[in-house]
Image (cartoon, rainbow, N blue to C red):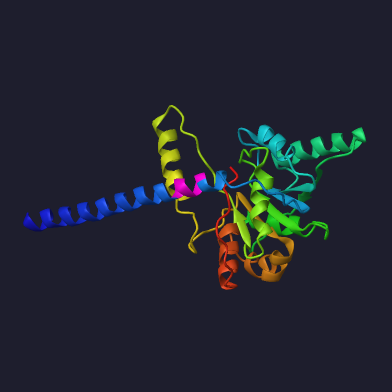
Amino acid sequence: MFWAVKVFYVLGTLLLFQCVWSLLDGIRFLRLLRRSRNTPARTYTPSAAVVIPCKGMDAGFEANLERFLSQDYPDYRVTFAVAAVDDEAYRYLHERLEKQAASGATLNPQTSLVVAGLSEERGEKVNNLIHAVGTIPEAAQVYVFADIDASPSPDWLRSLVLPLANPDVTVSTGFRWYLPGKGFASRLRAAWDTSIATMLGEHDRNFAWGGSMALRAADFRRLGIAEKYWQNTVSDDYAVTRAVRDAGAWWPRGRNPA
């Protein structure tokens, strides 16, 4: 039994070190957020194209849609992408956009709906993104990618695009924040997810999260993300992360807009 005790102490010591490291990492992340919030507000609002892949209608779909379409941003458009016309999300979006077009009102932002179909070479979400990007007007200066199950604040788009004012930043990313509910599962999910968020910071080990990320259109094309990195993959954000790292670009994480 002596060996079992030794193993227990070794594992216990490693767990203690991990807890201390996580605590220090959380403190560092808190300082980063406070410093970011205290930074004087700046204005950088190039024309932006927001791409949102959709599949089905989960809880909060309509509310989140309204949030994406009412951003405090002067010049942006939103393109929704689905895989098939029999998708519930397609039916809802198609009907809504048709009503808006029939009303004759000037839309801000402009919206469009793309049916990408299915692909045997890549994941459905990635295929939706590729086809949606192919329809974006050349005038768009920034590409923004988001998930419809996110609930963005009114300044989400401004905050996400702002770090790109620095020419050394290639990708700006946000991250999801799950608020704890009353149940144990909800609280566990919030705690688990927050521990991942605190891994981001002012270092070179960051990663892009596909639910909220932005790149300059010129960088997106220069890196060949759609042609090289999205052609045979199921992960959109991991591929973007790899593309930026392969290019040797430095991209500190910007202020989390969520």
Q: Quadrant of the N terminus?
A: bottom left
Left/right placement of residue 195 relative to residue 137 reads: left
> Where residue 50 sits: x, y (%)?
72, 50
Pinpoint residue 168: horizontal percent, then vertical percent. Answer: 63, 65
Q: Which of 78 and 71 is in front in this view?
A: 71
Residue name at image x 25 percent, y 56 percent: 14
In the picture, residue 184 is in which quadrant?
top left
Residue 17 magenta: no
Work out which residue is located at the far front of the displayed protein and give it. 40
**Quarter of the view holding residue 13:** bottom left
Furthest residue to the right? 104
Q: Quadrant location of the C terminus? A: top right
Observer-nearest of 199 and 63: 199
Q: Can residue 180 be seen in this view?
A: yes
Q: For the point 62% across and 62% down, which residue is it? A: 169
Which residue sits furthest top? Answer: 182
* Range shown magenta: 29-34
Q: In the visual, does 242 lie left or right of 106?
A: left
